Image (cartoon, rainbow, N blue to C red):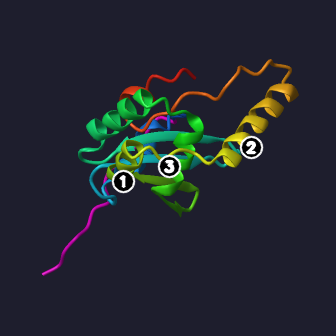
Amino acid sequence: MTSTLTAPERITLPPSEDRTPVARAIVQSIAVDHAPETYLWIVLHRPDGGANIWHAWTEGGEPLGDQVDRAAVAAGMDAADWLHIGDLNCARSTRGRITVEAYALRPVLADVDSGIRCPHDRRDHLVRVIEEAARQTGQTPRPGLPRWLGMGPALVNSRTP
């Protein structure tokens, strides 16, 4: 008996600059590899030197991230606290041109609830960096530090570009 294979008809897809479907698939494939209740900050580095940032949450991460944010804002936490607590609870990894920061939200909430704050020397350094960036760009720095940046979708998605 002889089997014959026929080549499938060639399909031509129109060219597209829209990378969103591919990026979304990449983000979803990364999310399934992480534990529940995790906030993912995913940076897709482009060949042109730019980057696209995607935010994702694993199962249970969205409501827990919003709970973290409500507690942090109520406690008066700011960007320095967000950086410090985030660093304490972040697992970083890379996949080629993709950088993933995975924040375990239960420990983040525990740190917020226990009142962990950014050390003064790191806070002062951040203020100096912001002041220098303002000086170099001809802007007037605002007093204090920016607000808590967010680990839940309500606050993360409220940012203006």
**The image quarter in which residue 94 lies:** bottom right
Tell which circle, 2 or 3, labels the residue nearer the N-terminal end. Answer: 3
Identify residue for label 2.
Answer: 125
Residue 72 visible to an observer of this rendering: yes
Nearest the camera: 70 or 113? 113
In the image, is 153 to the left or to the right of 60? Answer: right
Residue range highlighted in magenta: 1-15
Q: Amino acid at mark 2?
A: His
Nearest the camera: 122 or 136? 122
Q: Marks 1/3: CA distance?
A: 10 Å
Identify residue for label 3.
Answer: 86
Residue 153: % across, % down? 37, 32
Q: Is residue 149 above or below residue 2?
A: above
**The image quarter in which residue 75 lies:** top left
- The reply to whether discs 2 and 3 touch (Cβ–Cβ < 8 Å) is no
Q: Amino acid at mark 1?
A: Pro
Can you tell which mark lies on residue 149? none
Q: Marks 2/3: CA distance?
A: 17 Å
Q: Residue at x 31, y 35 (%)?
A: 67
Can you tell which mark lies on residue 107? 1
In the image, is 2 to the left or to the right of 124? Answer: left
Q: Marks 1/2: CA distance?
A: 25 Å
Residue 146: % across, % down? 60, 28
SS at mark 2 in the image: helix
Image quarter in which the C terminus is found? top right
Residue 14: % across, % down? 47, 35
Nearest the camera: 92 or 73? 73
Residue 12 visible to an observer of this rendering: no
The label nearer to you, 2 versus 3, is 2
Q: Residue at x 51, y 32 (%)?
A: 148
